[in-house]
Amino acid sequence: MSKTSVRSEPRQEWEKLQSAARFLKERVPQPPKIGLVMGSGLSAALGTLEDEVSVPWGEIPHFPQPTVAGHAGELTFGVLEGKPLVVQRGRVHYYEGRSMGEIVFPVRLMKLLGVKIVVLTNAAGAINDSFNVGDFVLITDHINTIPESPLRGPNLDELGPRFPNLNDAYSPHLRALAHEAAQEVGLTLREGVYIATPGPMYETPAEIQAYKRWGADLVGMSTVPEVIAARHCGLEVLGISCVTNYAAGIRPEARPTHEEVLEVTKQREKDLAKLIRALLPRLQA
Ligand code: HPA
């Protein structure tokens, strides 16, 4: 590959983002200030937004196309609790074979649309055995074992610095607001460190023991690349995990299955929606 083509890579990525942003700006009545990325199975209870406009992923130039069967794949714009939002239902994952560029495209696009705060939700396995299945856990920090960074390669200078730091990547201020919101609706939030694995296989019990010693409380296969890209471009981040199972070996019976993950997210999505509705009025975006 010639030097010129290496240099043109970030330009192309930037142009793709800009063309997607232009497309959406023409269709969306009010620019969103807050982005919600809802893990699969966690979004239905949010209900309809005021002045809702939904755009199928397939219509947005360069937006990654969903691969998981049964995923609607829409970006929804509108107002909830007085706040202009964009809701991304579902996401694309590293284990699907997606490039990092595709995985972080939606979060970067949110930045270009005017979003200031992104709330990312996911399903996770509990490594910390004081957590209960069904708990919501605020992510305080992460450990990344996904073998690629979304920032690898020439820097997209338009978005952020070459060497961003990840101190306080998960905003302590937003976490404090989330605790207040939880209290208002009678929920208790836990806190913990999330470790991202490439998947799609669940971990071995030995891996989970190693991750526990590293200081991880939760394990999952998403979110971290999006958080890295969000912090790179200066978005404030709140990460909320729904504990769907104990990670492999944490309990004698702990053998994670996709079915139990889906079942628990289905049971907990109403409470997550309650929490998010209580949080929104507190956000100064
Ligand atoms: N491991 C990895 N990802 C997950 C898990 C798990 O136990 N539960 C939900 N997502």
Image (cartoon, rainbow, N blue to C red):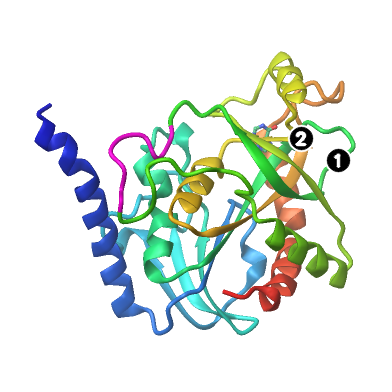
- In percent of the image, x 44 and y 63: which residue is there? 74
Label 1 CA crowd tier, 10 Å (few <14, some 14–19, many 20+)? many
Seen in the picture, residue 56 relative to 134 is either above or below; the reply is below
Seen in the picture, residue 29 relative to 14 is either above or below; the reply is below
- In percent of the image, x 56 and y 79: which residue is there? 49
Q: Is the C-beta of the residue carrying label 2 under 8 Å from the nearest atom of ligand 1?
A: no
Using the rendered view, name the quadrant where residue 73 is placed.
Answer: bottom left
- In percent of the image, x 29 and y 79: which residue is there? 26
On the rendered image, what quadrant is the C terminus found in?
Answer: bottom right
- In the visual, does 34 lie left or right of 18? right
Q: Is the C-beta of the residue carrying label 1 under 8 Å from the nearest atom of ligand 1?
A: no
- In the visual, does 208 lie left or right of 58? right
Q: Which residue lies furthest to the top in this view?
A: 206
The stretch of residues the image draws in magenta is 149-157
Tell me the amino acid under the disc marked 1.
Phe
Q: Report the disc number at residue 131.
A: 1
- In the visual, does 241 lie left or right of 61? right
- Magenta residue check for 214: no
Q: Mark 2 points at which residue?
A: 217
- Magenta residue check for 154: yes
Assign ligand 1 to one image quadrant: top right
Whether label 1 touches label 2, CB < 8 Å: yes
Local SS, label 1: loop
Q: Nearer the viewer, mark 1 or mark 2?
A: 2
